[in-house]
Structure formats: C-alpha cells, structure tokens
Amino acid sequence: MGQKLTKIERMYDTVAKEWAETFSGEHEKKPKDQEILHRFAREIGGRRPVWDFGCGPGNTTKYLKNLGIEISGLDLSEKIVEQARRNCPEVHFQKGNILRLEFQNDSIAAVVAFYAIVHFTKEQVETAFREVFRVLQPGGLFLFTYHIGNEIIHLNEFLGKKVDVDFMFFTTDFIFSCVKDSGFEQIDIIEREPYSGVEYESRRSYVFAGKPVAGKQS
Ligand SMILES: C[S@@+](CC[C@H](N)C(=O)[O-])C[C@H]1O[C@@H](n2cnc3c(N)ncnc32)[C@H](O)[C@@H]1O
C-alpha cells in the first residue's frame, strides 16, 4: 500500500506557496539540469504535444517553454497548479493524476517528470511508468528524475508547515528494470552527486527512455 494520494495532495496544497517561493528558478543553479533539459528539447525537436507531469510550480515547464518548447503541465495539487499558473501564465496547467492519466493512448510526443515519483511506492512507480508508456506516441520520449538510494525519509515538518509525508529514494537497478518492463527502449541513465548548499544532499539520476516506434512487442 502506498501513501494515500489525498495525503500527498494535501501536503502540496499546504506548502504550495512556500514551495513555489523556495524552489523558484532552481535549474539556474544546477548546470546538469540545464544540460539535460537542453538535450530533451533537442531530442523532441518539433514534435508535440509535450507535458510536464508532477510539474509542481512549473519551474521545469517554464525552463522548457523558454527553450521554445510548447508545453503543458499537470499536477495532483490544485494549489500547486495555481502557483504554476502564476509562475508561467502563458502555459496551460491542469490538475491530474499520473497513476490514472486521462489521455488517449499514443497521444503525447514527450513527457518530462522531475522528481514526480518521490512519493510513490515501487508498485506505484510501475503503474506510473506503464501509464506514461501508454499515453506516449510511438517514438515518444520520457525524461524523469529521482533520488538514488534505499531510504524513505519521513517528514513531520516541511517549509515551516506541519506535514506527514514520506519521500522515497530508488536504486538505479530497480528503476532500470521497471522502465524496461514497462516497454521502454533506448534507456539512458545519468547520475550525479548533489550540488552542495543548493539542494538536498542526495545523489540524483536523470533517465531518458523512448517508446519504440512500433510499440511494445508482447
Ligand atoms: C517533488 S515535487 C516536484 C515538482 C516539480 N516537478 C519540480 O521538480 O520542482 C512532486 C510533485 O509531484 C506531484 N505529484 C505527486 N503525486 C502525483 C500524482 N499521482 N499525479 C500527479 N502529480 C503528482 C506533487 O503534487 C508535486 O507537485
């Protein structure tokens, strides 16, 4: 059993304003994020539509928009979505659940999801990857990030607010097999050390994965 989605939603509703203020423009302080997002933009080229799932207050969405990518954002928390709209008024943001996406099969050219799986159990990660695979067009591109490790960090207080939530770390072995089992190919995993003084001191991973042009062979 995972954390109840309502619990995660409530947590982000509670810290939405503080989250938006604290993490505003964070990619500017992280050269590897920038390199990865430029690569994502290059690999997408002119293909559309592009979505940021678990977009938070829209920092990644805005970065990609500024690189010329027509992009939309989706998040579980209505309050976070409000912050994203404020942060990036020219972009369409909507409430939604990665674990039950309301998109047609084969309908999206590319999905980015920075740290969107941080509250998921392993079973929920599998569900999320299957859902992303389902909605991506053949040849579609998926980029996501996670914290590397085995830890589960429980927080009772976050950004000055009372919360009750778990942050999950994942091993790269688990993520690799899970991405592969979902049907993705051309999996490229890039790991890095934390940027000291800039972010939480955990090792980070960026994953590029492609949906095969011919679709998953069963
Ligand atoms: C750690 S934050 C990352 C936000 C943003 N991508 C970033 O990197 O700044 C995780 C985000 O995922 C969202 N989220 C969590 N579970 C979700 C779900 N099932 N569907 C959609 N969004 C979800 C949360 O509301 C939160 O905004």
Image (cartoon, rainbow, N blue to C red):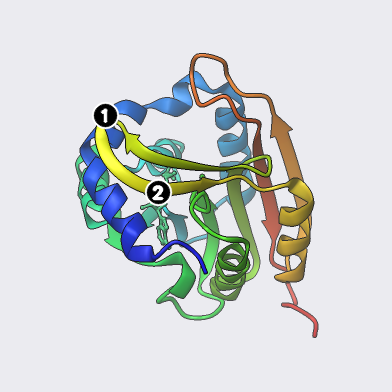
Pointer 1 residue = 21
10 relative position to 62: left or right: left
Identify which residue, 122 or 50, lies in the foreground: 122
Tell me, yes or no, if residue 127 can be seen here. yes
Mark 2–mark 1 Cα distance, whole angstroms, equals 20 Å
The spot of residue 95 in percent (x, y) is 29, 63
> From what the image shows, is residue 50 above or below residue 144?
below
Residue type, numbered disc 2: Val
Where disc 1 sits, the SS reads helix
- Pointer 1 local density, CA inside 10 Å: few below 14, some 14–19, many at least 20: few
Q: Are marks 2 and 1 in contact (CB under 8 Å)?
A: no
| Residue 195 placement: quadrant | top right
Which element is circle 2 on? strand
The residue at 44%/61% (across/down) is 3
Q: Position of residue 155 (x, y in %)?
A: 41, 40
Looking at numbered disc 1 in the image, what kind of residue is underneath it?
Glu
Q: Give the image location of residue 206, x and y in percent.
A: 65, 41
**Is residue 88 visible to us here?**
no
The residue that disc 2 covers is 165
Marker disc for residue 148: none
Query: Which residue is nearer to you in this view: 165 or 77?
Result: 165
